[in-house]
Image: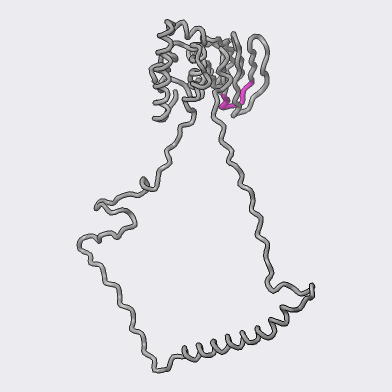
Amino acid sequence: MAKLAPTQLEELQNIGAYLRQVRQQQGLALDVLAHQIFIRPALLQALETGQGAELPEPVFIQGFIRRYAEALGLDGLAISKEFRVTPVEVIPTANLLTKADTNGATEGSESTPPRGLRMRDPAPPPPRASSSRPSPLPLVLSLAALAAILGLGAWGIFGRNQGSDPSPNRPDPVATTPPAPVAPETPETPEPEASPSPALEAPVVVSATLSDRAWLSVKADGESVYEGVAEKGFKKTWTAQTSVVLTTGNAGGVELAVNGDRPVVVGSNGAVRTLTLTPDSDVKTVESAESP
């Protein structure tokens, strides 16, 4: 059965209470409504009371909510989306990531050393050795000032002559680098919301999962929809309006989930079994089926 997150369980309880109130206002009995939408009364009772442990996986719960709401004349798609198949995780903020230590100081602050230990004082920096040599700074400044004066005089002489030259082929003194093109921002594409499985819209839903190689023959409403040898890891879901007839040559390697109920192994390894599954079938139907 489903293991729901706290947020999913709260959503389920709110939706279930609302659907039960609408059903009672319309004067519909739970058993009558369950027969109309092909869902067992026990599952509808668990949905109304928010008992997630009695229900199948979240994707099946979302499909049950939609079928229930549409049977009451409500917008089933909108109401089913209020129950999210994947719970939303809360992203911790920077304040939540800061942990306080036992003395009330946060991580990164100076910690108090344990009793019995003394912190050693940092060693003082070594004294700077005094130098008797004179500083060369005044000489350097004088040379820099002389170079600046000579540079300004040369620019006054040669710069004016170059500025009056009308030649169009004279290169520009400063090369201008064009700015790099900026790539346009790509808008974020929102993730599509999970929608209920379309298989839940049919009265009979049969899901098979193989843990070993097995031969399968499946007929939906009298029409053959699959026949062949399926390998380990094979997964497939079939739907029908009245019945699904499944025959396997290795019952121990086939698990079936019928009408949203929990999956169960069909039989023992190497056994040949044939099952006829209808809207009223559940896990007990699979467990009680006999080999032909």
Q: Position of residue 175 (x, y in %)?
A: 69, 69
Q: Is residue 63 visible?
A: yes
* Residue in the image at 68% along x and 21% along y: 228
Q: Position of residue 161 (x, y in %)?
A: 72, 82
Up-down relation of residue 135 to residue 168 (above or below): below
* Residue in the image at 57% along x and 32% along y: 192
For residue 167, what is the image quadrant? bottom right
Q: Position of residue 120 (x, y in %)?
A: 26, 70
* Residue in the image at 33% along x and 49% along y: 99
Q: Quadrant of the N terminus?
A: top left
* Residue in the image at 20% along x and 63% along y: 116
Q: Left or right of 112: which side holds 248?
A: right
Up-down relation of residue 175 to residue 267 (above or below): below
Q: Is residue 46 visible?
A: no
Which residue is farthest left?
Answer: 116
Q: Which residues are magenta?
A: 209-215
Q: Is residue 246 magenta?
A: no
